[in-house]
Image (tube, helix red, strand yellow):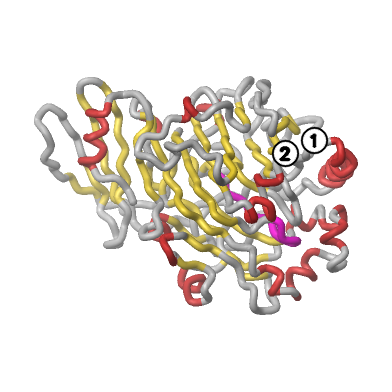
Amino acid sequence: MRLTLLTVVGFVSQGLAGYSLLDDYNSEDFFSMMGFFNGIDPTGGYVTYVDQGTAQADGLINTNNNQIHMGVDSTNVASGSGRNSVRISSNAVYNHGLFILDLAHMPGGVCGTWPAFWLLGTGTWPDSGEIDILEGANDDNFNSMTLHTTSGCTITSQSQDSNAHLVTPNCDINAPGQAQNQGCTAADNRAASYGTQFNANGGGIFATEWTSDAINIWFFPRGSQPGDYNSADPNPANWGTPTWTFTGGCNIDQYFRNQQIVFDNTFCGAFAGGQWASSPTCSALASTCNDYVQNNPGAFAEAYWQINSLQVFQQNADSSAQAAPAVKPSSTAISVAVPVATSVPVATSALEATSTEAPVVVTSTVSAPAVSITTFVAQASVAPSTSEPGVSANPLQADEFGVGSQGIPVSQNQKEKKDTRTRHLNAHLHKRSF
């Protein structure tokens, strides 16, 4: 649900400190606030991404019991480009903010799967950056967090949270001494952070705070979340040390801008397919990842997202945190007058929408004592990506090889697995050129 003009004006009375709700991706509005990608998978996965109508008709998506469900085809032998699944991205783009996902179930822990929850910058990848919050592949039992940028962004700070460790420090996809497209990655060592154990624990909360100074990611296993995570004004300052803080030798505002929220669940590809042979559990099921995913539909009954809530908050003093439309507006412009309190001068313009169901996107600049507000009405259909000819879906650019695909647990009894996986992934991280 996009906040109204009057709601934004109300932010002024709350003062300039703290966070306020900007977007509520509740079960009633969730899919109307998202675009469905139905082109060829940029990550080379064995998957067919379907449009919203097909996903609805085939039971891949629903909003039962006030939860958002996104699954895959777990009934039919796959054919063509691969198993039917869903990839969506937000109609809005963001600059800064606090993104809080309450997740009851994720698709991870299933051989052949490669799910991710992430933020992706518009334009040519990775010029606007990429922030990978949750990702893994096959039977991984830890979460990887990764940034992907052009050259000049490195991470020098270390998290004080003993639950995580740094894997690679350079966010540049072409960094010397790192695999192609690897980026800077931190791994959460807790089994409850990803896959089978995450689901057995009832899920958890991922919170990402993006400011000019740093990108902080918290993961709270179910039962350990802060009391205000789902309040109207959450305060990360009271949440303790983040699971990981990305900061150091990187100008955050230079490398990260205009980000869309993305959920996807692909199969095999460069990540899950690339490390298939290194997983004793998965490689015992079939000789190749594609063969297993194609011929074992029932194995993917648990490969679904179940979202309790997704909310985006803005810092009241940060005008850059406001969202803007990621969809192509009509070329016809109109001006409208909006009556507001005389003490708050407002300038408003709107772009005429071509759909009656277009979301209203509000951006504001807060300055005492006045607020200048611009409101855009964007059409509901998404613009095709200029980098992927023929794809009539969100303007999504291909992501890097896989968000944090090289994340490695650090416990002593996993050292051998760590060394083997690192060598194996370094040989498979090459995906494609942009």
The residue depicted at 37 percent of the width and 45 percent of the height is 23
Give the secondary structure at mark 2: loop
Left or right of 142, for residue 85:
left
The residue depicted at 68 percent of the width and 53 percent of the height is 195
Picture quadrant of residue 66: bottom left
- Whether residue 326 appears in magenta in the rendering, the answer is no
Percent position (x, y) of residue 230? 42, 42
Residue type indicated by callout 1: Val
Q: Mark 1 points at which residue?
A: 410
| Span shown in magenta | 109-118
Q: Name the residue under label 2.
A: 189
CA gap between label 2 and label 1 equals 7 Å
Q: Which of 102 and 400 is in front in this view?
A: 102
Residue type indicated by callout 2: Asn
Q: Nearer the viewer, residue 150 or 344?
A: 344
Residue 119, visible in the rendered structure: no
The residue depicted at 67 percent of the width and 45 percent of the height is 403
Question: Of marks 2 and 1, which one's residue comes earlier in the chain?
Answer: 2
Residue 398, visible in the rendered structure: yes
